[in-house]
Image (tube, helix red, strand yellow):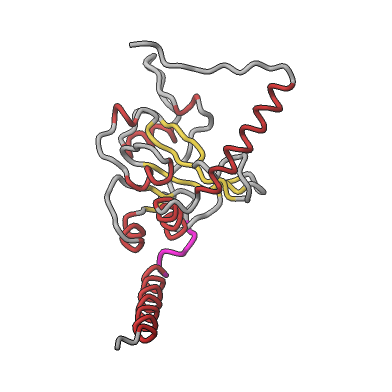
């Protein structure tokens, strides 16, 4: 007769050993040394592999404004920080957005944001699985992630493990509740806005 209790204990011990080995393997990636971490467009299956792919970018500087990240055709030179980013990552311009569930309307002090080529669907070719997990839609090319501290108003130092934890958790649907709560808060703000007599406009793409 099979002793299921024995096999359950064996499976639990094996899982515990595996988790312990992974935590030990990830220890070197827990240091918070940089405010910006590059997510390259490469595939991964396990968290240790993802941590090795992620790259700290101490030289990254976001645009001073949304307009500063957009390159025009007028021959105007972008600000030096933007020019360096465009050259390093092969971007056409610099866009950014908060990760769903971690925006200004979310709970908690960590507001996670990604920077990317603002035209990545047309200018970039290589899919980025990590960025797709964070944003929930097709993402291409290099992405850079940062974490804005709500209390200080500045991007705080982050670790590669923090970013990997976030990516893997979202791949597994772990942030669904946070996203729903943020969306509900946005709907409530919109209702309050409309109650003041303001009109909302739905933007639609032109017919092709």
Q: List x then y, in percent, for residue 22.
A: 37, 71
Residue found at the far right of this picture: 196
Q: Is residue 84 visible?
A: no
> What residue is rendered at 27% in x and 51% in y?
43
Image quadrant where one finds the C terminus: top left
Q: How many marks?
A: 0
Q: List x then y, in percent, for residue 51.
A: 36, 59
Residue found at the far front of this picture: 1
**Is residue 106 a member of the stretch shown in magenta?**
no
Image quadrant where one finds the N terminus: bottom left
Q: Is residue 93 visible?
A: yes
Camera-side residue: 182 or 115?
A: 182
Query: Is 86 above or below relative to 12?
Result: above
Q: List x then y, in percent, for residue 48.
A: 34, 63
Q: Which residues are magenta?
A: 27-33
Query: Is 200 above or below relative to 26?
Result: above
Choose top left, top right, bottom left or bottom right for residue 25: bottom left
> What residue is rendered at 49% in x and 46% in y?
146
> What residue is rendered at 38% in x and 37% in y?
137
> What residue is rendered at 31% in x and 38% in y?
141
Query: Is 174 above or below relative to 17?
Result: above
Choose top left, top right, bottom left or bottom right for residue 138: top left
């Amino acid at each position: 007769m099979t002793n299921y209790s024995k096999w359950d204990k064996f499976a639990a011990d094996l899982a515990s050993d595996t988790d312990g080995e992974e935590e030990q393997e990830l220890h070197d990636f827990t240091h918070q040394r940089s405010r910006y971490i590059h997510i390259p467009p490469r595939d991964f299956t396990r968290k240790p592999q993802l941590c090795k792919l992620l790259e700290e970018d101490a030289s990254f500087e976001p645009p001073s404004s949304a307009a500063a990240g957009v390159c025009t055709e007028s021959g105007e030179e972008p600000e030096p920080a933007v020019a360096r980013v465009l050259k390093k990552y092969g971007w056409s311009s610099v866009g950014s957005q908060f990760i769903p569930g971690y925006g200004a309307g979310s709970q908690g002090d960590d507001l996670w944001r990604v920077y990317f080529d603002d035209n990545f669907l047309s200018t970039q070719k290589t899919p980025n699985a990590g960025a797709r997990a964070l944003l929930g839609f097709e993402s291409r090319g290099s992405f850079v992630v940062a974490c804005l501290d709500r209390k200080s108003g500045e991007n705080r130092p982050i670790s590669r493990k923090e970013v990997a934890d976030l990516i893997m958790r979202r791949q597994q649907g772990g942030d669904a509740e946070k996203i729903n709560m943020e969306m509900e808060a946005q709907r409530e703000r919109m209702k309050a806005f409309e109650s003041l007599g303001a009109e909302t406009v739905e933007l639609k793409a032109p017919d092709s």
